[in-house]
């Protein structure tokens, strides 16, 4: 969602206003790349974490949020 809206923070109104024709493979790949980078960063900082538990970890959510904030702050 963040890659589509080009923002780490968005509202339900932002989501409702999405133009679905703007969603494409390039955008999907960008989102996948961002997610994998955040997972790699989390694993580097938490070497004992396994993927199953990481998916439920608030720490991973925090890393993803921070990475998105950084990405979209630099684009403004």
Image (spheres, grey):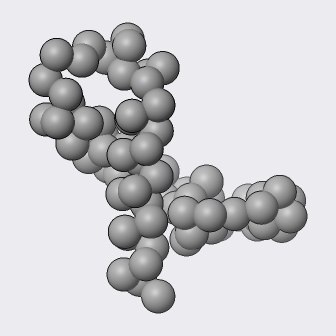
- Rendered residue at 46%/39% (across/down): 61
- Displayed quadrant of residue 54: top left
50 relative position to 59: left or right: left
- Rendered residue at 36%/57% (across/down): 67
Location of residue 69 in the rendering, given as x and y in whole percent from the top left corner: 44, 65
Quadrant location, the N terminus: bottom right
- Displayed quadrant of residue 53: top left
One can see residue 69 in this view: yes
Location of residue 31 in the rendering, given as x and y in whole percent from the top left corner: 44, 51
Of residues 13 and 33, the one nearer the viewer is: 13
Q: Relative to 37, is 57 above or below? A: above
Of residues 68 and 30, the one nearer the viewer is: 68
Q: Relative to 75, is 4 above or below? A: above
- Rendered residue at 26%/13% (across/down): 50
54 relative position to 4: left or right: left
Q: Relative to 39, is 47 above or below? A: above
- Rendered residue at 39%/35% (across/down): 60
């Amino acid at each position: 969602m963040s890659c589509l809206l080009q923002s780490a923070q968005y509202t339900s109104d932002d989501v409702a206003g999405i133009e679905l024709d703007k969603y494409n493979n390039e955008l999907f790949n960008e989102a996948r790349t961002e997610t994998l980078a955040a997972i790699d960063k989390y694993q580097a900082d938490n070497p004992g974490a396994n993927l199953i538990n990481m998916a439920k970890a608030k720490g991973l959510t925090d890393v993803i949020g921070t990475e998105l904030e950084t990405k979209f702050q630099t684009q403004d």
